[in-house]
Amino acid sequence: MHGVSALTTTTALTGLLVLVASWLLIGALGLVQSNRIGWVARTLFPLGALVALGVAAMGAMSLTTGSAAQTSVLPLGLPDMPFHVRLDALSGFFLLLLGSAGAGISIFAAGYFRQGEGTAPGLLCLQYHVFLASMALVVLADDAYLFMVAWETMALSSYFLVTTQHRIPEIQRAGFLYLLMAHVGALALLLCFGVLHGGSWLMTFDSMRAATLSPAWAAAAFLLALFGFGAKAGLVPLHVWLPEAHPAAPSPVSAMMSGLMLKVAVYGMLRISFDLLHAGPWWWGMLTLAVGLATALFGAVFAAVQTDMKRLLAYSSIENIGLIFAALGLALLCYAFDMRLLAALALTAALLHALNHALFKSLLFLATGSVLHATHERSLGKLGGLIRRMPWVATLALVGTLSLAGLPPLNGFVSEWLLLQAFLSTPSIPHAFTNMIVPLGAAVVALTAALAGYVMVKFYGVIFLGQPREPSLMQAHDAGWLERVGLAWLAVGCILIGVFPQAALDAIAGVTRTLLGTAVQRGPAPWWIAPVAQAQASYSGLWLLLGMAGVIATMFVLVRRMYHGRVRRVPPWNCGYPELTPRMQDTAEGFGQPIRHMFGPFFRIEREVPSPDDQRPRYRIQIDDHLWHGLYLPLARIVGWLADALSVLQRGRLAIYLMYSFLTLIVLLVFVL
Amino acid sequence: MNALALVSQLGGVVLAVALAPLLAGWVAQCRAWLQSRSAPSLLLPYRTLRKLFRKDAALATQASPLFRAAPYAVFGAMATAAAIIPSVTTDLPLAKVADAIALVGLFATARVFIALAAMDIGAVFGSMGARREMMIGFLAEPALLMVLFNAFLMFGSTALPTIVKGTLDADGLTLHPSLAFAGVAFVMVLLAENARIPIDNPGTHLEVTMIHESMVLEYSARHLALIEWASWLKLFNYACIGFTLFVPWGIAPHAAGPLGLLLAIVWLVAKLAVAGAVLAVIETVSAKLRIFRAPEFLSMAFLLAVLGLLVHLLLQS
């Protein structure tokens, strides 16, 4: 039996490597006829989606075949530093996430990419599949060398994808900011690995696992990892690139970055904090928890005041990443006090939320892509009423909207439920003050979740409901069939996880068993979850759905039987006022106004209000981040000033440069001798 | 799962659906008495429902399917919520399906659907109402969760029947200071969530001050009937949540025979009568707040509930 399972994991790892290679091959094939959209989009992208399905299947397989990790050494890399790969439950779960959401995005992308939008389709195909492959490699890497190579490939390929329409200055700026932040983060990770090897100078994760670090060095490694992965994931205050880069990219790329790449950062954080560092003292968890909660609240508040649909989703991603990191911090905290079951519960919440977010956020970003293609409009102020012109996109986006708002019986609710359950158990933490402060985190989670509902009503209501705010919207067309399939794939995923959450929890149980040595309890049936004890709490999405559907069906039949179903179509009542125009609806600004009012200190608001006797009154408002003006711009000024100061060295004369080399040589010789 | 449990489960939902308009009628009657007006009939809500169901639905030309589906979804969510709350007996097979967090989720589902429907027509007051409703909602929801957490911390469970059992099994009347904070917070949330004075006025005719009513201005006939019924059901549900948390006496325990259930129904009606009268008094003695005072009111509720948590944690350690 053991032999069989070892065999399957061997084949799983080999199979995965083949699949990753075929992604690269598909990307390269894009260059063959790089301008034929029929070849690139209709053939290669669906193939890429098939490969993604394979990756998901292999990932799922490695979760079911037990915890035996499979390793391999590739004949690639530097002569004395070959690439190591490893497939265990943690990487298996993230491959499942990557593949299942990636398949939907790729199918959608097959219908989405057109000619004449920036980069040539073939080149885009290469960048796209290199991006996918590098994410899979990050997850598979078993040494710091391959990890960093894949990590940087991921950053660079996504940079090129973000700047697809590189002629627009705004997008250039967004791309630059993204690249800068990606590299600041990567530097932190390099330093982190530099600490982790613990003096052995071996770069494999195995030796890092075995290395014994002094508490101070372990803490340094942890903080560097939190900084590095936090910069990639978008933790406050390292989030600034996210609301710029996500809207700049084409929608499938935004979906990949938000749905998948941020999760790869979560993976890295888990790998280093739990696997390589074996978790640490309780303040690691406390810090991660605090940063996560702050990020979640920050993201939710900012999402509520956005007027660009993709920026809104980007801030909502920040919020969700915050929730994931809060759950992760809670797991670290509980693990530090050796409360394994509670740690498993929190980690389960984190992983499930990561999976859920990959599904519904991709779905929504893709839906904005369809809207963008149909209307050429990104600003919420110029959309509206699309449910009547784009019923398919609107219906599927509604599933994503309700999931993101955390409503039962969809998937977003399940992970929030788990997170709240985890918070509720924290008063048993055996540490004074911690056991009083941490439960209050539940208050922040509750507030954030409720704000997410507000944000999603705004998002959906302003785009799809109401009257079209521009006459051109009357010509909007629904998405093509490939796009619909991609959206439907993700929507079905949201519904299935919501209705049968135990299946997802089973997949996660393998991960928590590997990392923490325990897992949450199984529910009595696939549609039941009772993670701690049935008496404490249980939930069944299926029964809830059936209950609601039963009531609705009964009411519908009763009303029709006892009364009638007659309908008269009339002009809207509008309190008797007949001249209704689209301008009378709430704008996106208007809908966010209560939040702006209440959370005023969060924002940096610039407002131009017309004077009473203005002939052509104009109202302008710009809402910015304090951190941008208070932290980043001063930092940029300091860097600029330093660069100016150092430019004295640059004389532009050969003799002086030669002298620099000579002096350096002397100094080095002095050191060596 | 025995037959009696199933009957009491179904019966509980039917009872809630049937009694909810009566509670609304009773509150309206009490209000009228307190304001020395001549009171409307206790059965007026039922007559309103019958009248509305009989009418032809006048639907705006641009209304989408979402607009027509939303009343059913809202009603479905509220009726399902009624199935979870142990208002008559704790022996509810369905109570395991969803705990109190899911209950809050169900209320949120109803709120989101009605807000989306309000934005669908694109009329002036619809989106204004949706915005206000969501504002109240996002402040009230965490406050309600915090109130519930107070009870959870005490009994170590998020399942409402367990909480009821925990209080009923306790010897004698023990006063929990944290529950006092939670109780005040709960009443504030109840007022806000059910569109009551001081946050909203269910009897208003001035559109600019409306919250709940302005969202349903475009509805008519059976759709309006379902929404009205759902909002009465919501008040009923909130009252029952309050009973389970703070005054669970009278709720039939497991394996109470049919007679016990009947007694529990009598208890429930009595408690509802008192609660309705108290609600009418609160509504009569307070004035409606400006809309931007509402956040202060609700953050007060939130803070009180969090204070309750803190008090519990402090006293416990």
Image (cartoon, rainbow, N blue to C red):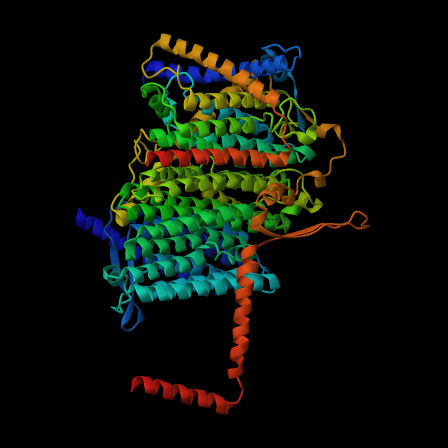
**Residue A53: x, y in percent?**
39, 49
Q: Quadrant of residue A200?
A: bottom left
Question: At 65% across and 46% down in the image, what residue appears?
Answer: A381
Report whether residue A365 is seen: yes
**Residue A362: x, y in percent?**
48, 48
Question: At 54% across and 18% down in the image, what residue appears?
Answer: B278
| Left or right, A210 with reference to A568 | left
Q: Is residue B313 above or below residue A626?
A: above
**Residue A571: x, y in percent?**
72, 29
Question: At 36% across and 39% down in the image, what residue appears?
Answer: A422
Which residue in the rendered view is the most extreme toward the bottom? A655
| Left or right, A145 with reference to B15 | left
Q: Nearer the viewer, residue B48 or A158?
A: B48
Total numbered badges shown on the rendered structure: 0
**Residue A259: x, y in percent?**
45, 50
Q: Quadrant of residue A599?
A: top right
Q: Nearer the viewer, residue A427 or A651?
A: A427
Q: Is residue A643 above or below residue A493?
A: below
Quarter of the image with the C terminus of chain A is: bottom left
Q: Is residue A484 above or below residue A41?
A: above
Q: Is residue A52 above or below residue A520?
A: below
Report whether residue A362 is seen: no
Q: Nearer the viewer, residue A94 or A189?
A: A189
